[in-house]
Image (tube, grey):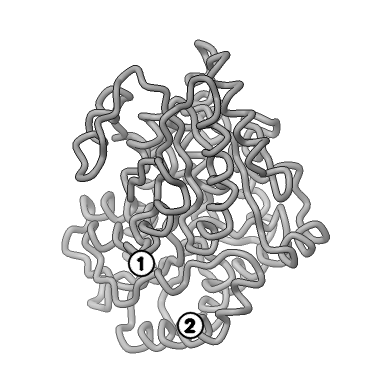
Amino acid sequence: MAAGGGLMVVCGEPSGDAIAARALQELRLLRPELQVFGVGGDQLQQAGMEVVQHIRELSVMGLWDVIRRLPAILGRLKQVEDLAMQRRPDLLLLVDYPGFNLRLARRLHGRVPHILYYISPKYWAWKKGRRGQVARYADSAALIFPFEEADYRELDFDASYVGHPVLDLVENAPDRHTARSRLSSLAGVEEIGQEEALVCFCPGSRETELRRHLPVLADTAERLRRGAHPPRILLQLADAFDPSLRQEAARSIPGCTVIQGHFHACLRAADLALVASGTASLEAAALGTPHLVFYRMDAFSIWLAHRVVDLRWVSPVNISAGREVVPELLQNRANGKALADWCSQQLRSGPGEDASGGLRASVEEALGGPGASRRVAGMIVDKLENP
């Protein structure tokens, strides 16, 4: 391969950061000398990428959030485009985040040797034209759902199903006993007993999600505390959150244990969890943690979603399985009483002996086994050597 500018990676949110970082770890085994730079977060940085721009300013959710920050996002788009033109990568890896990355692909199409799109936009749920945009502006794609491959091949496009990276993300998660011990050793965390009833709140990885969900979770916690046998509550926050947000969250839910990061350990330690919809639900299922998916969006986004989204479920666990594996409560149904009632019922009855194994089996049946990150790394090497 001729000398060039290495690999440029662009992702826009924490889940993409984690997925890209896992692929980069595999890539380092194949091409340890490869220069890797781009837009990412703390996990990509820890994996050895030169983070030129951080995802912190890009991580938004909901149409109103995007509109409110549109000038800043468009400015960042131009900066990332300029970065590609300055550094001239041999390959551009775009990870999910279609609202941003499809625009970037259109701007850079034909100006970099190869664009590989990892994690297709959910064209099968809404914005069906995005499949055509990927085929038009990217050179190849790594797909995480098996049915997507045939859809893209209809367009005579170089697309390969690699499997879902969630199974790679959780492979080194601690067991329940180790997870509780590990969390107990963190600064400021009171020891978590091995037999203590534990509920984990996962409000989402974006600041907008956290602020929208905190009041609901605060009400849930208060109702659980009034029960005959109140559980201990962990509030798990994303690594990228500013310390001031952690303090605000702790004030919002008095008495809870706030833990920043350590997502898999929190889920493993918990008897059950309340999880904001997204990749986190897949991770919880792959870890075998009984959970309920909840979510609230701003009024305009949900109005629009009702008109354009063609989905029976929002949890990727349920979408992948084609049935309701985990319960979902959305919008007004995601309220303190409903969430507390579900937690109380689960704690009273127990999830059942096969619940954890059943969740893991559902994910593996729908998505195949681990190894997606290794396969993506292999694709990158192949495209670098044969652009």
Is residue 50 at least partly visible in the picture? yes
C-alpha gap between disc 1 and disc 2: 14 Å
Q: Give the left or right position of residue 30, taking residue 341 as reference.
A: left
Q: In the drawing, what numbered circle is on residue 77?
A: 2
Q: Quadrant of the N terminus?
A: bottom left
Helix, strand, or loop for circle 2? Answer: helix
Q: Is residue 42 left or right of residue 375?
A: left
Q: What x and y, as percent, mark residue 168?
A: 37, 40
Residue 230 higher or lower than 9, as above or below: above
Q: Position of residue 160 (x, y in %)?
A: 52, 51
Q: Quadrant of the C terminus?
A: bottom left
Q: Which mark is residue 40?
A: 1
Res 245 → quadrant:
bottom left
Which of these two is toward me, 26 or 272?
272
Q: Position of residue 41 (x, y in %)?
A: 34, 64
Q: Nearer the viewer, residue 292 or 334?
A: 334
Is residue 370 or residue 115 the one in the foreground? 370
Query: Residue 25, relative to residue 360: is it above or below?
Result: below
The residue drawn where x is 23% and y is 29% is 181
**Outermost residue to the left:** 33
Is label 1 in contact with label 2 (beta carbons under 8 Å)? no
**How many other residues sit within 10 Å of disc 2, few (<14), some (14-19) or many (≥20)?**
some
Residue drawn where x is 60% and y is 42% of the image: 316
Q: Is residue 118 above or below residue 82?
A: above
Q: Residue at x 40, y 70 (%)?
A: 56
Which amino acid does the dot numbered 2 rest on? Leu
Q: Residue placed at 16% from the left, 64% from the top?
A: 33
Three-letter amino acid code of the residue under disc 1: Gly
**Which mark identifies residue 351?**
none
